Image: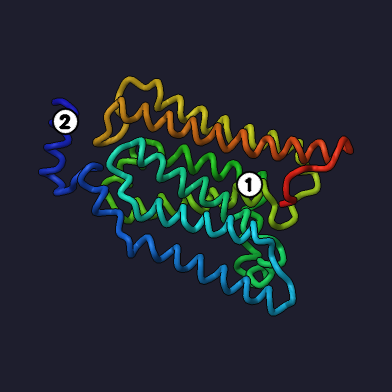
């Protein structure tokens, strides 16, 4: 039986639609509003607490956090699941770009009240670079295994879990690299370049699977759409890597005494 015929038969057996029809159903503005409002309320509360302690945070950090919240809200509210390429964009917004901006939006003094919470303290080792990178890589690869990816397409709860894990692992990854809290002394800017290269190699390898596969890996997505999604992953991962690598190179120059870094200290 052809893949299209199999999908039609599966619809009859399960009563479930697939990406094109499901996109609008799963992208509920109210569901998107919950994490956006929660993050916004938490950040405002932390800002007010910081002000009461007579301290302030640079405006560029506030702008970065606002951008992260906006990207997360856009990714969750927009009906992007209908095609693999736009679904890939959604996952990159949730698991890469939004976490990057959110981590840029915080620093140690701002996070001080959260660090006083015992549960948060116990989770802090997850942001260690030797923990965060493998967690992120394993999570990214596993969720793109056909059995798990198709399960997320079929079941809204699994899809929500997928998004939550992309977001959590992405946040831990960027927290390890950008260090809003002090990291290991050995994790210099030069070693962060290697860390960034490892991140890029993971995304490069996964994107090549989508770009060169001659069969459709997931329910409801064509080979051409799959290749477009691989291109989206490759472009986004490369663009972010280049930007962060340039910043890290400036840091390396500054640390070795050839000149001062020309970018804000993170």
Give the crowd class for mark 2: few <14, some 14-19, many >=20 residues within 10 Å.
few
In the image, 67 versus 77, the foreground residue is 67
**Which residue ends up furthest to the right in the rendered image?**
257
* Label 2 element class: helix
Give left or right: position of 10 versus 224: left
Q: Position of residue 152 (x, y in %)?
A: 33, 47
| Quarter in which the N terminus is drawn | top left
User: Closer to the observer: label 2 or label 1?
Assistant: 2
Q: Residue at x 43, y 29 (%)?
A: 231
In the image, 69 versus 96, the foreground residue is 69
In the image, residue 15 above or below residue 217 = below
**Which residue ends up furthest to the bottom in the rendered image?**
52
What mark, if any, has residue 57 been given in the picture? none
In the image, 50 versus 203, the foreground residue is 50
* Colour mapping used in the image: rainbow
Give left or right: position of 29 versus 141: left
Q: CA distance from mark 2 to mark 1?
A: 42 Å
The residue where tag 2 is placed is 4
The residue where tag 1 is placed is 131
Q: Position of residue 57 (x, y in %)?
A: 69, 65
The quarter holding residue 148 reads top left
Q: How many marks?
A: 2
């Amino acid at each position: 039986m052809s893949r299209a015929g199999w999908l039609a038969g599966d619809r009859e057996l399960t009563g479930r639609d697939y990406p094109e029809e499901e996109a609008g159903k799963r992208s509920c503005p109210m569901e998107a509003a919950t994490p956006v409002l929660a993050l916004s309320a938490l950040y405002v509360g932390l800002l007010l607490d910081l002000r009461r302690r007579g301290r302030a945070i640079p405006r560029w950090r506030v702008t970065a956090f606002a951008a992260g919240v906006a990207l997360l809200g856009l990714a969750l509210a927009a009906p992007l699941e209908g095609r693999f390429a736009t679904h890939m964009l959604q996952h990159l917004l949730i698991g890469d770009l939004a976490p990057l901006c959110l981590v840029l939006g915080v620093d140690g003094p701002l996070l001080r009240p959260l660090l006083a919470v015992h549960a948060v303290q116990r989770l802090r080792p997850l942001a260690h670079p030797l923990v965060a990178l493998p967690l992120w890589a394993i999570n990214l690869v596993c969720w793109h295994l056909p059995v798990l990816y198709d399960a997320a397409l079929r079941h809204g709860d699994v899809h929500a879990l997928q998004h939550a894990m992309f977001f959590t692992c992405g946040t831990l990854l960027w927290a390890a690299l950008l260090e809003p809290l002090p990291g290991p002394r050995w994790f210099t800017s030069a070693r962060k370049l290697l860390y960034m290269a490892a991140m890029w190699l993971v995304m490069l390898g996964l994107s090549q699977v989508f770009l060169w596969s001659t069969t459709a890996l997931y329910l409801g997505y064509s080979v051409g759409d799959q290749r477009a999604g691989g291109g989206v992953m490759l472009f986004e991962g490369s663009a972010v890597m280049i930007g962060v690598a340039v910043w890290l190179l400036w840091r390396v120059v500054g640390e070795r005494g050839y000149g001062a870094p020309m970018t804000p200290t993170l």
